[in-house]
Image (cartoon, grey):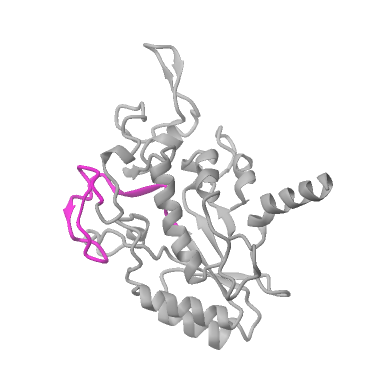
């Protein structure tokens, strides 16, 4: 009995490493910035007939609208809320895409931007893809909602609040002689407002968003900027995720997790730090 329980626990822990593709299908294509309607057609007309297993889609959640430069690709990586409307399409179009792709055996993997919200200089107003109000200066994102309490501004120990040295895992504070939190994980990445993922409230809002997508029928997630989050914080919100929708997946199937951790050597943060949460890219 003890052996059976151990094997069950090991299977549960490793489930997020499986891409959940149909038997014989191993390739996942990245249709970057494609419209949901076009991806649905691509699944039916080309990907399924040619044996593709899945599609990674661009972030589906509401983002800031940037006009200078005009609508760059990276605005998609500056969330304003977790509502499902972007220039790729609205929620109904997203649901239709997931259903149609799943129905022909091509699964959908979402690029999940959960390390941060938009840039600190994003201003205030409704210049967002769903029209939701936000105030980056006040850290106010009422469509989630997040407030100033939900960000790492107080934890980052650099003068600028930005990541200043990727070579330093810890900052030595000369006044108190204490090792402080990892700069790379607790300071702002290119001025993007860094979420306080050690807070259960923030973890729960992230999991709520991801679970909503699971209910729609997605098969897994690419975790954007995973290097900039503590592995334990990622594990905490992953532990809150549901099993996949049984309309298309076997009961008890966990979402596939693959994390973006840029590791070219010479830095203290390693891709191997994240192996316990899922695959690393």
Q: Give the range drawn in magenta.
A: 112-141
Q: Does the magenta stretch include residue 257?
A: no
Q: How many labels does the image show?
A: 0
Relative to 238, 81 lies left or right: left
Residue 114 appears in the picture as rendered: no
Rendered residue at 64%/45% (across/down): 275
Q: Is residue 235 positioned above or below 257 on the image? A: above
The one of 192 and 100 positioned closer to us in this rendering: 100
Q: Name the spot of residue 184 as percent of width and height, x first.
A: 45, 36
Q: Name the spot of residue 164 as percent of width and height, x first.
A: 39, 32
Q: Name the spot of residue 135 as percent of width and height, x first.
A: 20, 49
The one of 80 and 123 positioned closer to us in this rendering: 80
Q: Main secondary structure of the magenta part?
A: loop
Relative to 182, 21 lies left or right: right
Q: Name the spot of residue 192 as percent of width and height, x first.
A: 33, 45
Q: Is residue 105 positioned above or below 153 on the image? A: below
Relative to 62, 238 lies left or right: right
Residue 174 in which image quadrant: top left
Which residue occupies the extreme left position in the image?
125
Q: Does the magenta stretch include residue 128?
A: yes
Q: Is residue 181 positioned above or below 17 on the image? A: above
Residue 242 in which image quadrant: bottom right
Rendered residue at 26%/66% (across/down): 130
Residue 65 in which image quadrant: bottom left
Residue 197 appears in the picture as rendered: yes
Rendered residue at 63%/56% (across/down): 16
């Amino acid at each position: 009995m003890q052996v059976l329980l151990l094997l069950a626990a090991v299977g549960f822990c490793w489930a997020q490493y499986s891409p959940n593709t149909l038997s014989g299908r191993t390739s996942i294509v990245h249709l970057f910035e494609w419209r949901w309607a076009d991806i649905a057609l691509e699944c039916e007309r080309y990907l399924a007939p040619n044996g593709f297993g899945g599609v990674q889609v661009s972030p589906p959640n509401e983002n800031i609208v940037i006009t200078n430069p005009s609508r760059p690709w990276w605005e998609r990586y500056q969330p304003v809320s977790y509502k499902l409307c972007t220039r790729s399409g609205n929620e109904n179009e997203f649901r239709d895409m997931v259903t149609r792709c799943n129905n022909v055996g091509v699964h959908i993997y979402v690029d999940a931007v959960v390390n941060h919200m938009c840039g600190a200089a994003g201003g205030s107003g409704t210049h967002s893809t769903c029209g939701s109000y936000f105030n980056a200066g006040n850290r106010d994102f009422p469509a989630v909602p997040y407030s100033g309490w939900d960000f790492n501004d107080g934890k980052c120990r650099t003068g600028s609040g930005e990541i200043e040295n990727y070579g330093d895992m810890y900052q030595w504070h000369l006044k108190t002689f204490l090792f402080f939190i990892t700069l790379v994980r607790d300071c702002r990445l290119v001025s993007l407002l860094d979420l306080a993922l050690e807070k259960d409230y923030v973890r729960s809002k992230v999991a709520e968003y991801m679970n909503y997508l699971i209910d729609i029928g997605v098969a897994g997630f690419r975790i954007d900027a995973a290097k900039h989050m503590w592995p334990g914080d990622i594990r905490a919100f992953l532990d809150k995720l549901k099993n996949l929708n049984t309309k298309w997946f076997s009961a008890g199937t966990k979402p596939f997790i693959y994390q973006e951790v840029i590791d070219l050597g010479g830095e203290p943060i390693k891709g191997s730090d994240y192996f316990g949460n899922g695959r690393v890219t």
